[in-house]
Image (tube, rainbow, N blue to C red):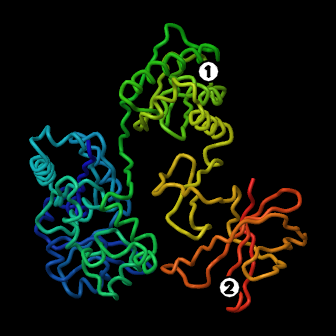
């Protein structure tokens, strides 16, 4: 089932709350003010104050000069946060997944919910009506992506629901600010004459990246659905949960292990049946003194393999203090993902290469910490140092496949390091090179492999790479920057082969 999101935009949240709290303010011109650098500034204006020229950001003294009858109230800086959290909890009646979109909105994951109200249009109207009756002015939009729903809710003009897969058409006439871009980037786009998304959405990504950086491509991708974006629910789902009450309080490590194994078997059986796997797990115990103790794990890929998950928990079981005894055990999987058919087949076959690697990495992360383990993902770049990206172990998905067919070193230096060489002829590999004060005599060489500059990022001479081997059988990746006859080329070492 494709994801669907609803964005709620409370365009006058604080002033609406003031009117709800003090009915006598309805129809009155008033503002909420905050002190800043020795002055009082308008933080929020009622619609009546805005109609008479009093806007947020104005100095209160100037606002009173415009409107002498203006009423001014002190603003609580945490008011928006409290209001949005309360409204998010209220919205759980419409969907279990609601997130605060500070400072003026909420994001609802409505996948599979709207049909209970007779469709998305009725669903949206019901929410708007209920919030309107409570006294809040709000705009709402629905789309496949958070970015598109957010943009349309704030800058849309009449079409509030994007058809499945139709977010592109809905955002084309919207301004760049609807992509949630930084102020400096918006100013630059304004200087270049970009007033609508339609003016740049089809430009080559390389050109947009060179001019505006990765931020624009990320936000555009989040609106179109090519970049992943998640929300943090105010009340996380805990549907994947198993509990085990105990006849007698459990005090021993052996008893705790038996309880964990039984819960894992039950939870993994359910996950396997639904084609899902655990990514994060929480094992907790309710002690007789009322205190809850717990440990948690994370996996590099979705798993419903009980013995593997038990090993990850086992590393932390000593931290679970039973006190005077645990009378209730609980196992939760707050984050689960689909398990591909390839991985499912690997559990029961004689080939365990992929599984063994995943489990080994999980065990290492469990012992030394998830933050100590990283992954490398391929990037769409020719320049070697830009062709890979380091990401945390549990995060990131490749946007392209790893290139094959060309030798690449196991250890690639973050940046090439200069060397001095002796070369017989221009296109020949070096006979020897000096690196960090040591001379390496080359006995074998392969190359050159030419890699041109990525012109959309920078200009300059090409690189000619050579794979060379010294007298000890150690192989290195060297390159020449520039061409003989066109200045004096420079040589660098860029990596080491196994």
Quadrant housing the N terminus: top left
Tell me which label, 1 or 2, sits earlier in the chain: 1
How many badges with numbers are in the image?
Answer: 2
Q: Tell me the element at label 1.
A: loop
Q: Quadrant of residue 294?
A: top right
In this image, 213 relative to 487: left or right?
left
Q: Is residue 471 above or below residue 127?
A: below
Residue found at the very far top of the displayed protein: 247
Residue 64: x %, y % from top left: 24, 83
Residue appearing at x 34%, y 68% in the figure? 180
Residue at x 90%, y 69% (from the top left corner): 438
Residue 483 - label: 2
Q: Is 451 in front, or is 331? A: 451
Q: Nearer the viewer, mark 1 or mark 2?
A: 2
User: Mark 1 — residue?
Assistant: 323
In percent of width and height, residue 261 lies at 54, 18
Residue 87 located left or right of residue 305 = left
Residue at the location (65% across, 59% down)?
407
């Amino acid at each position: 089932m494709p994801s669907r999101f609803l964005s709620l935009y409370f365009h006058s949240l604080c002033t609406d709350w003031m009117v709800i709290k003090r009915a006598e303010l309805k129809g009155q011109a008033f503002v909420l003010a905050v002190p800043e650098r020795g002055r009082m500034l308008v933080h929020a204006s009622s619609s009546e104050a805005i109609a008479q020229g009093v806007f947020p950001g104005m100095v209160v003294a100037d606002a009173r000069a415009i409107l002498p009858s203006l009423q001014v109230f002190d603003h609580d800086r945490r008011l928006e946060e409290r209001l949005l959290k309360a409204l998010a909890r209220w919205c759980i009646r419409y969907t279990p997944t609601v997130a605060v979109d500070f400072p003026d909105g909420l994001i609802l994951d409505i996948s599979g919910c709207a049909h209970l109200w007779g469709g998305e249009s009725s669903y949206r109207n019901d929410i708007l009506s209920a919030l309107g009756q409570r006294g809040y002015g709000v705009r709402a939009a629905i789309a496949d992506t958070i970015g598109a729903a957010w943009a349309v809710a704030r800058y849309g003009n009449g079409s509030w629901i994007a058809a499945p897969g139709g977010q592109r058409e809905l955002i084309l006439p919207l301004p760049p600010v609807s992509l949630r871009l930084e102020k400096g980037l918006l100013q630059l786009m304004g200087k270049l004459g970009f007033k609508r998304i339609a003016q740049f959405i089809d430009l080559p990504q390389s050109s947009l990246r060179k001019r505006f950086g990765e931020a624009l491509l990320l936000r555009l991708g989040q609106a179109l659905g090519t970049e992943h974006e998640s929300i943090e629910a105010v009340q996380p789902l805990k549907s994947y949960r198993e509990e085990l009450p105990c006849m007698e309080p459990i005090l021993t490590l052996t008893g705790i292990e038996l309880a964990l194994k039984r819960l894992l078997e039950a939870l993994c059986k359910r996950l396997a049946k639904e084609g899902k796997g655990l990514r994060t797990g929480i094992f907790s115990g309710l002690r007789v003194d009322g205190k809850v103790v717990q440990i948690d794990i994370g996996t590099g890929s979705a798993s419903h393999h009980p013995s593997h998950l038990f090993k990850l928990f086992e590393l932390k079981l000593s931290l679970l203090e039973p006190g005077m005894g645990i009378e209730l055990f609980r196992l939760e999987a707050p984050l689960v993902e689909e398990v591909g058919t390839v991985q499912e087949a690997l559990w029961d076959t004689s080939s365990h290469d992929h599984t063994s690697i995943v489990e080994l990495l999980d065990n290492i992360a469990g012992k030394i910490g998830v933050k100590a383990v990283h992954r490398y993902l391929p990037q769409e770049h020719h320049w070697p140092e830009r062709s890979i990206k380091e990401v945390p172990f549990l995060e990131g998905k490749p946007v392209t496949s790893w290139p094959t067919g060309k030798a690449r070193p196991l250890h690639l230096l973050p940046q090439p390091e200069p060397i001095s060489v002796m070369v017989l002829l221009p296109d020949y590999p070096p006979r020897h090179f000096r690196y960090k004060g040591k001379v390496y005599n080359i006995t074998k060489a392969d190359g050159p492999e030419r890699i041109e500059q990525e012109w959309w990022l920078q200009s300059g001479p090409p690189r000619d790479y050579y794979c060379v081997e010294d007298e000890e059988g150690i192989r290195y990746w060297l390159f020449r920057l520039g061409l003989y006859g066109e200045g004096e080329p420079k040589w660098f070492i860029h990596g080491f082969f196994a």
